[in-house]
Amino acid sequence: MRHGSIPGARGRVRPVTLLGDPVLRNPCEPVTGFGPELARLVEDMFATMYAAQGVGLAANQIGEPLRVFVYDCPDDEDVRHLGHVVNPRLVEADGVVLRGPEGCLSLPGLEAGTERYDHAVVEGFTVDGEPLTVHGTGWFARCLQHECDHLDGGLYVDRLDGRRQRRVMRQAARASWGGRAAAGTR
Ligand SMILES: [Zn+2]
């Protein structure tokens, strides 16, 4: 990303994949090519995340099964964290486990109390292939863990206790997008 450019400004808003789409349930492939195509993907991801008013987005949420996520997310001290990670690895997730409201652009309009560590460290690369380390606390640590789960085919609903999981799955089935998701269309 060039100095002074606004992330996503040149990106295309793409449809967000919804619960029920198999691309959300398969582990994503590592990125091997650090070229203009990857930069375009990251731009599209920022544009899509902002259009959907999300704080994070994984590549499989726009149907690309690659290990990349973007974020623009505050922490509990209201410090803004903005960036992207290619081939991320969650190298630390520790501290206190907090249950807090968590949602996902692939289950629009829903949220549930989800347990997450309040500290996380992710290592990975920039679109240019430069190594990168991202530290997160609080809400941002939650975001980092959520996006890493996506790239392994996970969703926050997997981490809910039985009662909360049943409730959110019921709400998903009743949601306006639920039937479409079940039918596999986007
Ligand atoms: Zn999500």
Image (cartoon, helix red, strand yellow):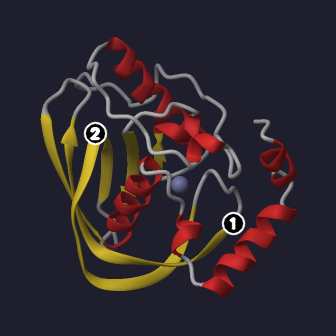
Give percent across and percent down for residue 88: 27, 46
Amino acid bearing label 2? Asn
Which label number is shown at residue 63?
none
Disc 1: which residue? 110
Foreground label between 2 and 1: 2
Task: Mark 2: give few (<14), some (14-19) or many (20+) Cα within 10 Å.
Answer: many
Give percent across and percent down for residue 21: 68, 44
Question: Any atom of ligand 1 within 8 Å of the CB at mark 2?
Answer: no
Disc 2: which residue? 87
Task: Look at 30% across and 53% down and name the residue there.
Answer: 81
Secondary structure at badge 1 equals loop
Closer to us: 92 or 30: 30
Closer to us: 78 or 107: 107
Relative to 38, residue 142 above or below: below
Task: Mark 1: give few (<14), some (14-19) or many (20+) Cα within 10 Å.
Answer: some
Amino acid bearing label 1? Leu
- Quadrant containing the C terminus in the rendered view: top right
Left/right of residue 166 with respect to residue 35 in the rendered view: right
